[in-house]
Amino acid sequence: MFRKLTAVIFSSVFLIGAWNFPALAKSKNARKNTPVYYLSIGTSLAAGVQADPLTGESIISDVSYPSELAGILRREMDLAKIRHVNLGCPGETAGTLIYGGRCDYPQGSQLDQAVRFLHAHGKFTGLITIDIGANDVLQCVDGAVVDPVCLQDTLDQLSLDLAHIIETLRDAAPGVPIVGMNYYNPLLAAFFVDPEFAESTIGFQLAVNLTLEAVYAAYGIPVADVAGAFMSYDLDTDLSGPGGSPNGIPDSVDLVCAWTWMCAFQNIHANDIGYAVIAEEFQEVLPDIPMRTPPRKRFRKQCRR
């Protein structure tokens, strides 16, 4: 039974894609009619995938961490026009983000689509957020077994691919802030079946997140600490019972159950609350967002003959 459960978990784990329009800025002195674009790229977390509450099947919802972040920024900014462009793709890897093959984009790949957008609107783009890398490690997982050699090779390639993605985005839109994120660990939900297995997944998750954080740090890019918010490396703390007393379940497991669909359907995606938490972690590290005032349009009076 455990083998089947872990197979289900690993078959869906890290399938971490829909295009909307919101944006952002931190300048209170900006002209209210100035459009500011927020571009989000990434995986199913960017796209807003959740579990169908009746069947548990993965579906794209109206809620994602970028949509939640755009809402936070909209409420806190003196801006009338917030435009959010979401290119997220379910199941996207760093490789498919660069070369395409997972979701259909007019330009061929998510990265090429992002570059096309930035060439057209980069002057008025105030923020880019990105989550990528979790799906890359799927090829190294077989049931409840992780191939360490495959994992290391994959993480090495992920480092190169993520660096290429960042450099490409910066070339297309110099000066536009980029914010990345690390990942929570949905496999901690296996605690109810096999606590030792759940604990063993912490090292796996840590390796993925350290790889991502190292690349982002090399480019001076802030990282939303989603793993920290979910207490993803902690199976010891247990203060979530009544009055802060232990309830026999690690707080990190309680959070995975409360903020994702793992405990209900073995579906690793965040729910509405989880997406709001992720957005708040982005907000915590958000840099100042540049505003550019467009040139005033010249209006010509047409003379009637």
Image: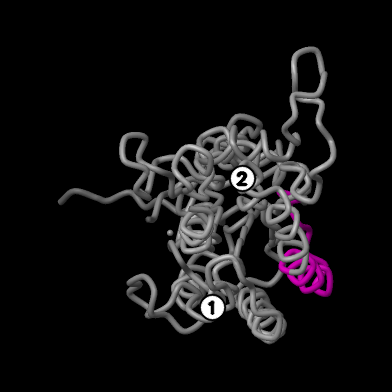
Disc 1 residue type (three-letter): Gln
Q: Position of residue 279 (x, y in %)?
A: 63, 42
Q: Is residue 16 visible?
A: no
Residue range highlighted in magenta:
208-226
Q: Is residue 139 visible?
A: yes
Numbered badge on residue 139: 1
Asked if 178 appears above or below 235 in the picture, the reply is below
State which tag comes first along the sequence, 2 or 1.
1
- The residue lying at 80 percent from left, 12 percent from top is 243
Q: Secondary structure at mark 2?
A: helix
Query: Within 10 Å of the Cα at label 1, are there few (<14), some (14-19), or many (20+) other Cα atoms?
Result: few
Of the pair 112 and 288, the residue shown nearer to us:
112
Q: Residue at x 79, y 67 (%)?
A: 210
> Up-down: is 255 above or below 295?
above
- Which residue: 78% across, 46% down? 228
Q: CA distance from mark 2 to mark 1?
A: 21 Å
Residue topped by disc 2:
189
Q: Nearer the viewer, residue 295 or 244?
A: 244
